[in-house]
Image (cartoon, rainbow, N blue to C red):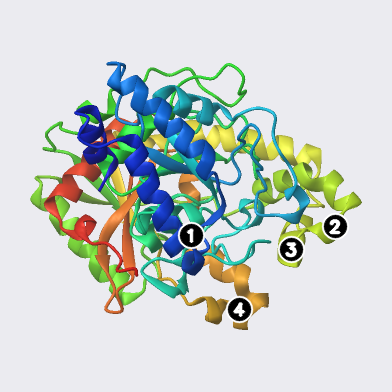
Amino acid sequence: MRILEAAELVRKKNVSPVELTRDCLARIDRVNPSLNAFIAVTAESALQEARKAEAEIAAGDWRGPLHGIPIALKDLIDTAGVPTTAASNVFRDRIPAEDAEVVLRLRQAGAVFLGKQNLHEFAYGGSSIVSCFGAVHNAWNTAYIAGGSSGGSSTAVAAGLCYGAIGTDTAGSVREPSAMCGTVGLKPTYGRVSARGVIPLSWSLDHVGPITSSVSDAAAMLQAIAGYDAGDPCSVNQPLGDYSALLLRKIENVRIGVPRNHFFDDLDPEVAAAVEAAILVLKGLKAEIRDVILEPDTDRSLQIGESYAGHRDRIAQTPERYQPETLRRIRAGEKVTEKDLALLRRKLAEGRVGAVRHVFEKVDFLVTPTVPVLPPTLAELEENPGGLRQRELVFLRNTRPFNVWGLPAISLPCGFSKSGLPIGLQIVGPHWGEAQVLSLAHAYEQASEWHKRSPQLS
């Protein structure tokens, strides 16, 4: 069952938030040992929140589609009184005093919090196999990776352990695991959703967004968390749309750009076939398909420099608390100076204003494969730890440019491999174009069958 389906039952009092929460907790008990998706399960407080929601709804105070709905959070997002660890021994005993802004907004919407989800340590990776709590497994086949860094969140949603989750995305960490786990992952425009209270990886590139089982659920979650936050210096005061209502806009005479260079290079044949079939579906929705050329900035100096700056003091004091691979990645930025960072941030700002905006004078959307390859097995990556980062950079190749440009982008299922692994389609829009992106994604979703599949778990 999806968020909006459950919400309607809750609103009509046909189902209780307590029942939904108990069902999720029972499923977590049964399935999580094989997935390692949750780091912490807050069962007692979740049931308290569910009872409160039940009483409010019974009294006629229904707040909207998230009221009484069990969701979960990537363990990078601060929760008052509950450990927020970033999947690292560095923060294993860290208990924040305040909620992150997105948590406050979800509480206002009446959501029920089931717990905190596993991730790639400090969100610095695309596989979720580097974590002090152990690797995350894919719900479709537990021998395979779930992607990262929001691997625990994506596989938990795919497995039905929660109705939705909040992840973070610095180079693709919401969309890439969503593609690998067959979920919907939305990265809003940079500055649309507050990152205050979220442990940073790279301040200039970090985004916060929902992971769900459907596009309409993603719209509902975005509605709850989006909006200006004066306490976040990166937040931008832009008008919000009614994302759920705008889903139903008719898709007609839209121009879809397909950037063949870079984004379609060296695709796995099964990924290529699924994405080309998806483009034909979009064309059948009366969309005009145009080839376009994009030139992504592949320089990662800003990310590695900001990541090092954020960890400099801790790695000087307690380097042994980091996983060795994470420590190696962080130290890669030690030669990036503050002067370098200032120049790189200016270059980033100029690129967001000019480098890609002209493309949206010619097209309304961009469409690419989310991930150019299929998920590998955990064993395959663990056999060659020295090559892990290069493999992850391939996983994130198609998603990272849209963090650099700050554009809204969504991944949703567009097929499955012969071995039963999900394949993702990425749809990208202009700055502040979340409503348009969601609308086209919803139209594609309704014209296809992929979203109706779910993994078979015991």
The quadrant holding residue 386 is: bottom right
Residue kind at label 3, given as amino acid type: Gln
Spatial CA distance of label 1 from label 3 is: 24 Å
Identify the secondary structure beneath mark 2: helix
Q: Mark 1 points at which residue?
A: 397
Residue 152 horizontal side relative to residue 234, left or right? left
Which residue is more in the foreground, 121 or 260?
121
Point 38% across, 52% down: residue: 157
Identify the secondary structure beneath mark 4: helix
Q: Name the residue under label 4.
A: 382
Residue kind at label 4, given as amino acid type: Glu
Q: Residue 319 carries which label?
A: 2
Point 46% across, 31% down: residue: 49
Identify the secondary structure beneath mark 3: loop
Spatial CA distance of label 2 from label 1 is: 29 Å
Spatial CA distance of label 4 from label 2 is: 22 Å
Q: Which of marks 4 and 2 is nearer the N terminus?
A: 2
Q: Name the residue under label 3.
A: 323
Q: Which mark is residue 452?
A: none
Query: At which x and y percent is residue 434?
Result: 34, 33
Q: Residues within 10 Å of mark 3 (few under 14, many from 20)?
A: some
Which residue is more in the foreground, 12 or 251?
12
Q: Earlier in the sequence, mark 1 or mark 3?
A: 3
